[in-house]
Amino acid sequence: MKKLCGIDEAGRGPLAGPLVVAGVILLEEIIGLNDSKVLSEKKREELFDKIIEKSKYHIVFKSAKEIDKFGISSCLKNSILEIIDNLKEFSDSFLMDGNTNFGIQILQKEIKADAKYPQVSAASILAKVSRDRFMVEISKEFEEFDFKKHKGYGTKAHIEAIKKFGRSSIHRTSYKIKGIDDKEEYIKSLFED
């Protein structure tokens, strides 16, 4: 009997940075797993190392440019397919947190799976910690945006920084921001015949 592979993502909604999708097959029980959103940063970091040590896993990054070019759903689907392809020799059962399987026949879906199944909790933690670490690292290059603080999500401070400095190369241009994009559209319309 092959083991269950849990799949989850981090970074579907932010205005900047990558989408990160992880797949995890646990080889040993790990105590304390839960949906990454309910765990403290310290706890997630501790569990990250344990998961890496006690599982077969695969992590996929999709950049802001890929998200802009192909769309978030396509990036998610392709990430899931890559995970399945990389882990199929160890698992014949794939479960994703959420309400869609993106038309992937082999993929099961369940809302709140990240709180119910340790494999999906582990995937949630790998995706979240990998993305957060990336955003902290990239923050050094884009200090004016303070990515280490908000990780690219649309906080008030982040939106104010975008208003002041414009979008950086790791911002998602396909994500419209109220108060910025509607003004740009209005200004453009003034110059059209």
Image (cartoon, rainbow, N blue to C red):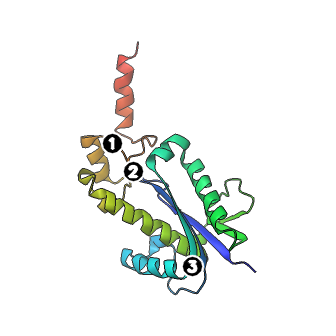
Secondary structure beneath label 2: loop
Q: Residue furthest top?
A: 193
Residue 97 lies left or right of residue 164; in this view the side is right
Q: Circle 2 sits on which residue?
A: 16
Q: Residue at x 26, y 47 (%)?
A: 161
Give the position of the N terminus as an image quadrant. Answer: bottom right
- Above/below status of 20 relative to 52: above
Are discs 1 and 3 less than 8 Å apart at CB? Answer: no
Secondary structure beneath label 1: loop
Are discs 2 and 1 less than 8 Å apart at CB? Answer: yes
Task: Indicate the position of residue 99 as horizontal and vertical percent values.
Answer: 64, 59
- Nearer the N terminus, badge 1 or badge 3? 3
Q: Amino acid at mark 3?
A: Ser
Q: How much space separates mark 2 and mark 3, taking CA atoms?
A: 30 Å
Q: Circle 1 sits on which residue?
A: 167
Q: Which of the pair 48/155 is nearer the observer?
A: 48
Task: Indicate the position of residue 160 as horizontal and vertical percent values.
Answer: 27, 47
Q: Amino acid at mark 1?
A: Arg
Q: Residue at x 37, y 66 (%)?
A: 133
Q: How much space separates mark 2 and mark 1, taking CA atoms?
A: 9 Å
Q: In terms of image quadrants, where is residue 185?
A: top left
Residue 44 lies left or right of residue 150; in this view the side is right
Name the mark nearer the viewer: 1 or 3: 3
Q: Which of the pair 189/32 is nearer the observer?
A: 32
Q: Circle 3 sits on which residue?
A: 55
Which circle marks residue 118 in the picture?
none
Residue 135 lies left or right of residue 5; in this view the side is left
